[in-house]
Amino acid sequence: MTYKAIIQLMSGDEAVIKSMASQISNLRTALDNNVEVELVCHGQSADFVVNAGNKWGDIIQKLLSMSVKIVACENMLKARNISAVQLYPGIKTVPAAIAELVIKQQEGWSYIKAGF
């Protein structure tokens, strides 16, 4: 059985982002890497997903190397005048984060709110 977890990141707070990265790493370790993870970024997490001046590149690279799918909400991007080409390489988009969370949970994915 492969587990599936959808993780919601709504914050740009350093402590929350570091906690999220640790939680994902711990989850993968506990489940012997037998877990598919999608990180859905919206709300105040815009700085986490934008390439220019991104201070989270090391964390993003680590997550991507663990096959974590990172997606950014197009509504968040539009509200901040950010285009998809401005995203950190490897980050994809979804039309609406809230809909992505509902869809994945309906498909049986476990929901986790990042941070604390």
Image (tube, rainbow, N blue to C red):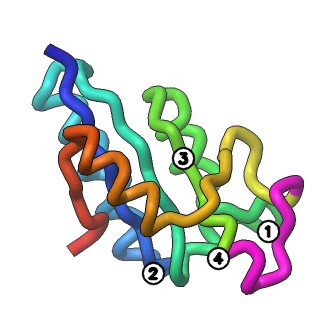
Query: What predominant SS class does the magenta segment belong to?
Result: helix
Task: Using residue 101 as the reference point, say whether residue 35 is left or right of it.
Answer: left
User: CB of mark 1 within 8 Å of CB of mark 3?
Assistant: no
Q: Position of residue 2 (x, y in %)?
A: 21, 19
Residue receiving disc 4: 76
Q: Position of residue 37 (x, y in %)?
A: 36, 37
Q: Give, as a single range, the part of the protein colored magenta.
A: 76-85
Q: Which is nearer the eye, 27 or 58?
A: 27
- Mark 1 or mark 4, which has the lower sequence index? 1
The Cα atoms of the two marked residues, 1 and 3, are separated by: 18 Å
User: CB of mark 1 within 8 Å of CB of mark 2?
Assistant: no
The Cα atoms of the two marked residues, 3 and 4, are separated by: 14 Å
Tag 1: Cα neighbours inside 10 Å, few (<14), some, or many (≥20)?
Answer: few
The Cα atoms of the two marked residues, 1 and 4, are separated by: 18 Å
Task: Name the disc covering residue 70, or none.
Answer: 3
> Could you tell me the amino acid type at mark 2?
Asp
Residue receiving disc 1: 53
Residue receiving disc 2: 13
The Cα atoms of the two marked residues, 4 and 2, are separated by: 16 Å
- Mark 1 or mark 2, which has the lower sequence index? 2
Q: Secondary structure at mark 2?
A: loop
The Cα atoms of the two marked residues, 1 and 2, are separated by: 16 Å
- Mark 3 or mark 2, which has the lower sequence index? 2
- Mark 1 or mark 3, which has the lower sequence index? 1
